[in-house]
Image: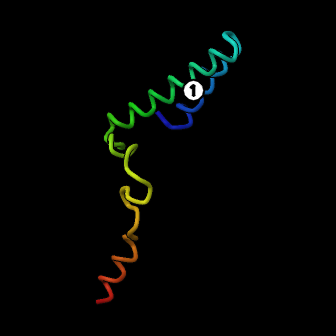
Amino acid sequence: MSMAVVGLVAGMALGFAGYFGGFGAFLVVAALGAIGFVAGRFLDGDLEPGDFFRPRGHGRGQGRDRDSDRDRDRDR
């Protein structure tokens, strides 16, 4: 399923919740959707628990530019 279809379904769910249940239901559906999204990313292996507790600038891919390292190694 494409990301456009997933976005469409999520938007429709939020719209129905807002229309039929009011703003409170809209917030509950949005919060549960966000929790489900994060849980799915964990299960896919895209996130690790330490990603939320690691200070900024010390995460994966931070601090070193792989492309510049590769260029530097190639020039040697």
**Would you identify the image quadrant in which residue 56 lies?**
bottom left
Is 72 rendered above or below residue 34? Answer: below
Give the residue drawn at x 55%, y 32%: 5
Residue at point 36% right, 70% down?
Answer: 66
Residue at 40 percent across and 43 percent down: it is: 52
Of 23 and 11, which appears nearest the observer?
Answer: 23
Res. 60 image quadrant: bottom left
In this orientation, which residue lies closer to the viewer: 62 or 4?
62
Q: Is residue 49 left or right of residue 2?
A: left
Above or below, 52 relative to 26: below
Image location (x, y in percent) of residue 41: 39, 37
> As drawn, which residue projects farthest toward the top?
20
Q: How is the image coloured?
A: rainbow
Residue 37 falls left or right of residue 15: left
- Residue 44 position in % (x across, y down): 33, 37
Secondary structure beneath label 1: helix
Report the amino acid beneath label 1.
Ala
Query: From the viewer's perspective, is 50 left or right of 28?
Result: left
Mark 1 Cα shell of 10 Å, populated few (<14), some (14-19), many (≥20): some
In the picture as drawn, the residue positioned furthest to the bottom comes out as: 76
The C terminus is located in which quarter?
bottom left
Counting from the top left corner in percent of width and height, residue 39 is at: 39, 31
**Spot occupied by residue 67 in the image (x, y as percentages of width and height):** 39, 73
Q: Residue placed at 65% from the left, 16% from the top? A: 24
Total marks placed? 1
Q: Pointer 1: what residue?
A: 10
Q: Is residue 9 above or below residue 52?
A: above
